[in-house]
Image (cartoon, rainbow, N blue to C red):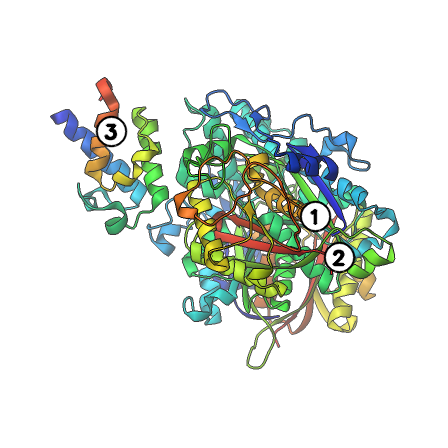
Amino acid sequence: MTGLGPVSSIGTGAAAFAAALRAGASGASPITGFDATGFPYRNAGEVRDFDPRAHLRRLDPARWGRSGQFAASAARLAVADGGLDPDRIDPARAHAVIGTTSGESAVAEALTEQVVGGGFPAQDPELVARLPAHRLANAVSEELGLRGESLTVATACAAGNYAIGYAYDLLVSGEADVVLAGGADSVCRWAHAGFYRLGALTESRCSPFDRDRSGILTGEGGAVLLLETFEHAEARGARIHAELLGYGMNCDARHAVAPDGASVAECMRLAHRNSGVRPEDVDYVCAHGTGTPTNDLVEGRAILEVFGTEPPPVSSIKSMIGHTMGAAGGFGAIACVLAIAEGFLPPTINWANQDPDLVGIDVVPNQARRARVRVAQNDAFAFGGNNAIVMLGAVA
Amino acid sequence: MVITGWSAVTAAGIGAEALARRVADPASAGRGVVVDGLSDVPLPAPTGHALPGFDVRAELGRKGTSWYDRTTALAVVCCRDALRSAGAPAGGDDTARIGVALGTTLGSHKSVSDYTRETLVQERPYWVNPALFPTTVMNCAAGQVAIRLGLRGVNATLAGGPLAFLNALRYADTVIGRGYADVMLTGAAEEYAPHRAWAAHHTGTTANVPLGEAAAVFVLAAAGEGVTGPRVLAVATGYAPGGGAAAGQALGGCVARVLRRADVDPAGVSAVFTGEADSRDTREFDAVTRVLGRAPERVLAKPMFGECDAASGAVALAVALSRADTGQVLLTAVGADGAVGAALVEVGA
Amino acid sequence: MAHAENRLEELRELVADVLEIEPEELTDTGDFMADYEADSLRAIEILARIDKRYKVEIPQEELPGLTNLKAVHDALARHSGGRG
């Protein structure tokens, strides 16, 4: 892992994002992406003043949706952070893999407004062309001139980790020299309404693992990492931030929205096994930690089951950036890389009271902490029971 | 990978036999059937390659299906039938090693748009139905397949539009090759709805062929002793920045790659199943003939089954398996931007 | 009284639809989860439909107690105030 490209509500670019994680910054703000009038809760982790033109060199933002712009901007930032000139690599061996929950949701909503206003014939064809979800990965391929696979993984809130996992497979199986992998999503009305209706939305402060946690804060952004084979990175003298050790995936096959503890625990074991890691090797867990009563309880208990009564520190960066959906796995992976490379644990902010059901879980409350992190675990779980956990390690 | 079973739900009906009948008599497709029963608003075209009589309740019962969108319903029914045809157990100890990889364009466009519409037209924007929320997420269909059939292995949804099925095939190939699962139900689904019909109309994808709906799913397993059936020999996808003529070049590259990977003589390729809508469009076929150095038979699935977007490639493979061909055939696809892909399949062995 | 009975029958239809059963199958005290295979999402859907239909918001904190039709009916009456 040689380059980081976060476009987030608490900072854009690796340095700004790292500083915000250390400071325990909050990205929550009143929603501007859509008219939130009439919603009881009107806050989200929006990327304010996002200007794709500040990042993009080839892509014409006018032809692409907001999520694609996030993905391409994040990818551009990642190659810049990694000091990689995409014009000097073998483009056929360079791939783009982007995870997402809602794809070009802002485009879908703009079109729906047109339909509500004037019926289906009134839709703008240019806007319709921006709708397909696969354009997220295509935006990255287009921006960087990559000729390898261009794959958008649509496994909801675990999609970022699926993407990073698939990138790992491309690298170890000899298909790739370089992969840009991560996720992107945009804040949208329908998800805000749906989560509110499920009783899963919090008013303004997301407080994962707190006794009184009340739900998620919807968020958005793009989170892309530059991954290379060791040989490729070494040959060009790249600075290697961290190593991708492997990952695990499974499926609850039980319920559309409720997570299953045994399955989540099994996914952790799978990730460890596939990565050649023992539980006692893990120094930090970057939790899925959405802030809903159910998720955090299920995840916390699974951690206690897998790691025993003294698990490694567990924190949720969603307390800071909200739930960025398909980008969440990407942001989590970036946080893990920073934890490993810079020696600190990102905090869980807005934390006040110990949950009596989660005794033993150290959530790194409110303040970042200096720590030596050799192995980190990045959790992501999704609707549909799609689970994916990525393991990262310090360079051996 | 070996295809140990498959099924399809298409305009021709539910199941492989219905599909085979239409393949044997392509003229029976015509311009499709009257589709106004599938929409409460005017449609851009009166007919399409849809299956208006498809009733998920009749197939799966009422319990647990009342909130399904049509994409999910098509996918679940098709996966059930595909698994049955493979003779694999739908329960038991090894379900953790059976996974799902489905291709899509954006899930159910109708579900997403209708949900948003509710937030706009209801007295309060949050008066949406929580039970329908999962249908707004693109992995709804694959997740429900897993739940309904009890499949706990890798569960993935791959977006790709025209490339979606080849993306799913490529993904399944990786999952099985890397040992994350033993069996992958691999396919794609796309529903007939006014949202898709109008989107296709606006972008011109149905200018020369009616819109279609379909699900087609293949049960894939690693090649090995006692595992028999048609074989997916190789899959390759790529991207051509800028699209256009570069996409043809890139597609040729994918074709060359699958032939090389499978170590197959180009002379052995008997037919190519392209994503082209009609015989006047030769962008994919030209790329194939350039690489092969000759023109094999070209088969177009779309005139028979309509523009099925993400499911187009899956329907094309189903068509290939229904014919009496033997030897190797190619599947190809090109996206609207610059995405391209090809698969090499050995049929009728 | 007739009004209250109408309300109960209306609710029976609404809840049965959510539970994917016929109204005749739904008894006043049959347990949603144990007897009709409902899950938490179904229960949330019942509250959402009541909110939309009767403009009455029953807080989600009461969900654990809303295990049968009678309990839902009582909760609706309790939160309707003068409007019931």
Q: Is A257 displayed left or right of B170 in the figure?
A: left
The quarter of the rendered structure image containing the N terminus of chain B is bottom right
Report the residue marked by disc 2.
B285
* Kind of residue at badge 1: Gly
Residue situated furthest bottom in the rendering:
B225
Query: Could you give the CA–CA distance between mark 1 and mark 2, rounded to whole angstroms?
Result: 14 Å
Q: Nearer the viewer, mark 3 or mark 2?
A: 3
Answer left or right for B153 relative to A178: left
Image quarter (top left, top right, bottom left or bottom right) of the C terminus of chain B: bottom right
Q: Residue at x 63, y 37 (%)?
A: A131
Percent position (x, y) of residue A337? Answer: 69, 48
Q: Position of residue A42 (x, y in %)?
A: 51, 25
Q: In the rendering, at what x and y percent does residue A236 appear?
A: 87, 54
Q: Chain of mark 2?
A: B
Residue beneath disc 3: C76
Q: Chain of mark 1?
A: B
Using the rendered image, report if marks 3 and 2 lie on a common chain.
no
- Note whether residue B236 is visible: yes
